[in-house]
Amino acid sequence: MIQNIGLIFDSNFKTGGGHFWRCFNFSKLLQNNKRKFFFISNKLDKNFIRILKKENFKYRQKINFNDFNQIKNLIKKLKLKIIVSDYYHLHAKNKKKIRDLVDKLIVIDDHLNKKHFCDIFINNNFMNNESKLKIKELNPNTNLLLGPDYFIHNKKFLKIKKKIKKKKRIKNIFIFFGTSDLSNETYKFIKSVSRIENINFKILVGNLNKNYKSIVNFCKNKKNMKIFYNLSNYRTLKLMQKTDFAFGSGGINLTERLFLGLPSAVICTAKNQKKALLALKSKGVIHYLGESKNVKEKKIKSCLNLYLENKEKYTHLENKMNIYYKKENFNLLEKSINFEIKEN
């Protein structure tokens, strides 16, 4: 019997494209010939729809996720056995009702202070014991998959990671502040390093970034600044593989940089990133620059010069990054979810 799985999420200028890629990678981990996946979201970018078609994943345009009757009708119409919610604004009362309609409700969420009323909860951010305890207290009857061992990854990650060798110095820098980059960190960054000529900057701009044209115009006469636009998740991984250092936000791409062992300076661009970033900072895993509103061009330039001029500092951060993920736990999420949702 075919097991129909529905994934609900949002992808727009405000939320960015990270939720799409997280749901996509999650589906790829679970994909087999006995499962059918339905991506349920707002009006997706045509490139995202093309990616789904290529994998034979179905797309349904977003209903009102907080209108329970619409949810109920969709579950019945598509004969969904499992719902995966990567939608932060799904009301708790609707999660309770959805849980009664399906075999399993899986929730993916980065927030620490919410009740989810689900069967499985995934938060693969780095967190301290206090944060884990808080989640457990709020969700006592839920299978909790917490921390980086449950990283939702692209299956090709391990192959790419094996090819990455330790770098002696910084030559190429990867820059990415999310698919939409609401606070325009990309433009702030390129302005701050505009006079540095002996380093190559690989600048990734997402398809929801409204400042794309101004970024391109600024970089067009800079031989050491190359723009990459709207890359797939796999092509982004390949690009990161060829770089030695990164500047970015604390979103989903940071988790990928951590796994690849790419030393990173990080700017907090959303409230739900802050606790995880402070925890990572306390362990020395990232160079935390602070919240977006407090990070000026001078601070970015000083940070870059610190790692360009201090080889020991760079090596120390690189070593910290490379012990963040345990290779033996790479398939832990896949095994855990498959065990929970297997049909009797």
Image (tube, rainbow, N blue to C red):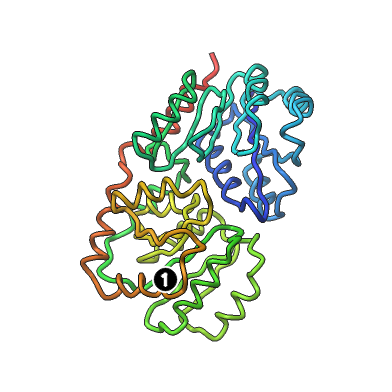
Which residue is under mark 1? 300
To which quarter of the image does residue 214 belong? bottom right
Q: In this picture, is 144 found above or below 314?
A: above
- Where does residue 283 sit, x and y in percent of width and height? 29, 49
Q: Secondary structure at mark 1?
A: helix
Q: How many labels, in total? A: 1
Q: Is residue 189 left or right of residue 170?
A: right
Q: In this picture, is 261 found above or below 109?
A: below
Q: In this picture, is 105 found above or below 245?
A: above
- Where does residue 343 sit, x and y in percent of width and height? 55, 17
At 63% from the left and 35% from the top, the residue drawn is 7
- Where does residue 15 sit, x and y in percent of width and height? 62, 50
- Residue 296, can we see it? yes
Q: Is residue 139 left or right of residue 302?
A: right
At 77% from the left and 37% from the top, the residue drawn is 63
Residue lying furthest top = 344
Q: Along the line of sight, which residue is nearer the eye, 299 or 191?
A: 299
The crowd level at tag 1 (other Cα within 10 Å; few <14, some 14-19, many 20+) is many
Q: Amino acid at mark 1?
A: Ile
Q: Along the line of sight, which residue is nearer the eye, 5 or 10?
A: 10
- Where does residue 200 sit, x and y in percent of width and height? 42, 76
The quarter in which the N terminus is drawn is top right
Residue lying furthest front = 294
- Residue 1, can we see it? no
At 56% from the left and 31% from the top, the residue drawn is 107
To which quarter of the image does residue 137 belong? top left
At 66% from the left and 24% from the top, the residue drawn is 93
